[in-house]
Image (spheres, rainbow, N blue to C red):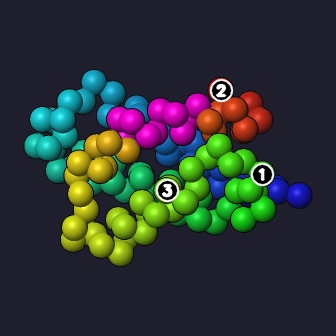
Amino acid sequence: MFKDEWVYIGHMLDMSRKALEISTDIDRARYDHDETLRLALTHLIQVIGEAAQRVSVEFREKYPQIPWREIIGMRHRIVHDYLNVDEDVVWEVIKQDLPPLVLALNEIVPGGE
């Protein structure tokens, strides 16, 4: 039924884990001074949002514990207003929003952990 959706969900999980992995032990000062790191993390957030956007409405409704609207909205802000990406928001997503997203995705992905 949701076969193709699992590809996107798996990608969301993989990219979320990757963002957390590369931001481990990174403080805000290093983030602010490392353009490559900021670009990489912003790109990963964008990819997570793109994958979420490709998941059907029916699938999203089946898993309301995932903040679909917020994830997709963040992707839109990065893509459509790329000149005004708020680094405070990106940092917050990485440090506060991705850890619970990984936990939630792990709960729904077969063999996620």
User: Is 80 inside the magenta-drawn segment?
Assistant: no
Q: Counting other residues with Cα less than 10 Å from the Cα at mark 1, is it few (<14), some (14-19), or many (20 or more)?
A: few
Residue at image coords 20%, 30%: 27
Judging by the rendered image, the residue that carries numbered circle 1 is 62
Judging by the rendered image, the residue that carries numbered circle 2 is 113
Magenta stretch: give its range: 94-103
Foreground mark, 3 or 2, reads 3
Residue in the foreground of this view, choosing between 28 and 15: 28
- Amino acid type indicated by mark 1: Lys
- Per the picture, the main secondary structure of the magenta-coloured stretch is helix
Pick the quarter of the image with the N terminus: bottom right
In the rendered structure, the answer to whether residue 52 lies left or right of residue 86 reads right
In the rendered structure, the answer to whether residue 98 lies left or right of residue 6 reads left
Image position, residue 83 (x, y; %): 21, 71
Of the two numbered discs 2 and 1 on the same chain, state the one appearing first in sequence. 1
Residue in the foreground of this view, choosing between 12 and 67: 67
Of the two numbered discs 1 and 3 on the same chain, state the one appearing first in sequence. 1
Judging by the rendered image, the residue that carries numbered circle 3 is 70
- Amino acid type indicated by mark 2: Glu
Verify CB contact (< 8 Å) between mark 2 and mark 1: no
Q: Is residue 109 visible?
A: yes
